[in-house]
Amino acid sequence: MDELIIAGKAYSSRLLIGTGKYKDFDETRRAVEESGAQIVTVAIRRTNIGQNAGEPSLLDAVPPSQYTYLPNTAGCYSADDAIRTLRLARELLDGHDLVKLEVLGDPKTLYPNVVETLKAAEVLVKDGFKVMVYTSDDPIIAKQLEEIGCVAVMPLASLIGSGMGILNPWNLQIIIDNAKVPVIVDAGVGTASDAAIAMELGCDGVLMNTAIAGAGNPVLMASAMKKAVQAGREAFLAGRMPKKLYSASPSSPTTGMIGK
Amino acid sequence: MVECNPTFLTAILKAMQLTVNGTPHSFEQNPNLSQLLETLNLTGKRLAVERNGEIVPRSQFGETVLTDGDQLEIVVAVGGG
C-alpha cells in the first residue's frame, strides 16, 4: 500500500486541504468529504465574545475525531506569535502536537519569512511539536528546516491564494531530491493539473485551500483534486517515458502495411 | 462638589478590570476563569485560554482566580488554510 507517512503515522490520502473561505460549514464538510483528505488545516483565532452558544462550529462540520487537524499559524509575522499560537492550539486540541508552522514576511505577497520560520521551528521542535513547515522553494532553507527536526517541509508552488501553479519546478525537484522527510507542495496550486504536476515531480503530497474553496463548484473541484493527486502519484511511481526531443517513434507496427 | 453620575458609581463598584481578547471587561469581584467563561456565554465550548502570556490548562479553570489587569486571550479553531 502506497501511504504517506508523517511523523510515523500513515495516511492513505496525499491531498491535504484547508478549511477556510467556504460559503458555509456545509460546503466545507462536503468539499472535505469529496476530497478524501485525512489531514485538514485549521486556524486559531480569538473567539467572538457574546456569540450564541448554539452557533455552528467548524468542529461539528469537520469533527476532529474523524480528521487529523493541522492547526496553522496563518497571519503570524514573528516567531514568537507563531509559537504562542501553536501552544494555544495544542491546549485547544488536547495535546495534539502535529502542526503547520508558517511565518509570513509581507502582507501583500504573504511570502514566508524564513529567518523567523527557522527560529520558530527550533523552539517548537524542542518543545515536542511535530512541525510541518511552510517555506519558500529555497532548497538550502528546506534542508535546514529538515535538519532542525521538522517532520515535513512544505515549499510554496507560488504565492498563497494566487492559483498561479508551480512556478519553479526545478527548485522543487532539488528540494525533493535532497529531502529525507516528506515534501508537500503548499500554496499556489490553481487547478487539477498543477496538483498532478507536483505529484509527478515526486512530491509526497499537496496542500491547498483556495484552489478548492475559490472554484466555481468547490465540491466538484475537491473531487478533481483527489483524482489529480492520485493520478500524479501513480505517474510518478510508474516512471514516465523519457522525453525524446525531435525524435518521433511510431506506436503501431512499421511492417505489414497494405499496398507495399 | 463631585457629581455622582451613574457611570462614576459603576466604575467604583466594578473596580476590577480584565482585558479579554483586547476588549476591557469590568467585574465587581475577582472571578475565577470558569466563572468568567460562564459570564461570557462560553461554557462548554472547545477553547484555549492564555493568561498574561501563559497557557491555562483546562483542568485549572476553576482554581484560576483572575486579578485586576489580567490580559486574557480566548481562542477557538476556525476555518483556515
Image (cartoon, helix red, strand yellow):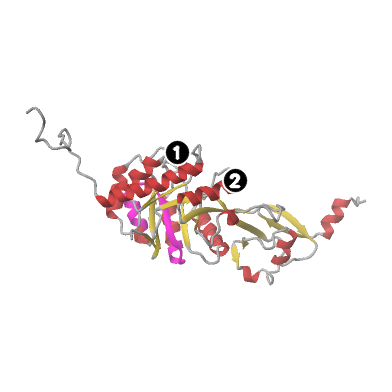
Q: Residue at horizontal 46%, vertical 45%?
A: A222
Residue A152 is one of the magenta-drawn residues: no
Query: Is residue A7 among what the camera can see?
Result: no
Inspect the image, locate mark 2, and give the three-letter code of the amino acid beneath it: Asp
- In the rendered image of this protein, does residue B39 appear above or below residue A230? below
Q: Nearer the viewer, residue B22 or A25?
A: A25
Percent coordinates x, y for residue A1 in the rendering: 33, 61
Tell me residue B62's x, y (percent): 69, 70
Q: Residues within 10 Å of mark 1 (few under 14, many from 20)?
A: some
- 2 and 1 marks on the same chain: yes
Give the number of the mark in front: 2 or 1: 2
Q: Residue furthest front?
A: A259
Report the chain holding disc 2.
A
Q: Quick one: SS at disc 2?
A: loop
- Name the N-terminal-most of marks 2 and 1: 2
Rendered location of residue A148, percent (x, y): 37, 61
Q: Which residue is mark 2?
A: A24
Dividing the picture into quarters, in which one does residue A160 lie?
Answer: top left
Mark seen at residue A183: none
Residue at 91% in and 50% down: B3
Residue at image position (65%, 59%) is: B72
Q: What's drawn in magenta, residue-wise?
A: A123-145
- The outermost residue toward the right is B1
Q: Position of residue A192 (x, y in %)?
A: 40, 41
A126 magenta-colored: yes
Q: Is residue A62 visible?
A: yes
Chain letter of the residue beneath label 1 in the structure image: A
Residue type at numbered disc 1: Ser
Q: Kindly check if marks 2 and 1 are in contact, taking CB atoms under 8 A apart as contact.
A: no
Query: Which residue bears the numbered disc 1?
Result: A162
The total of numbered circles placed on residues is 2
Front residue of this view, candidates A228 and A125 = A228
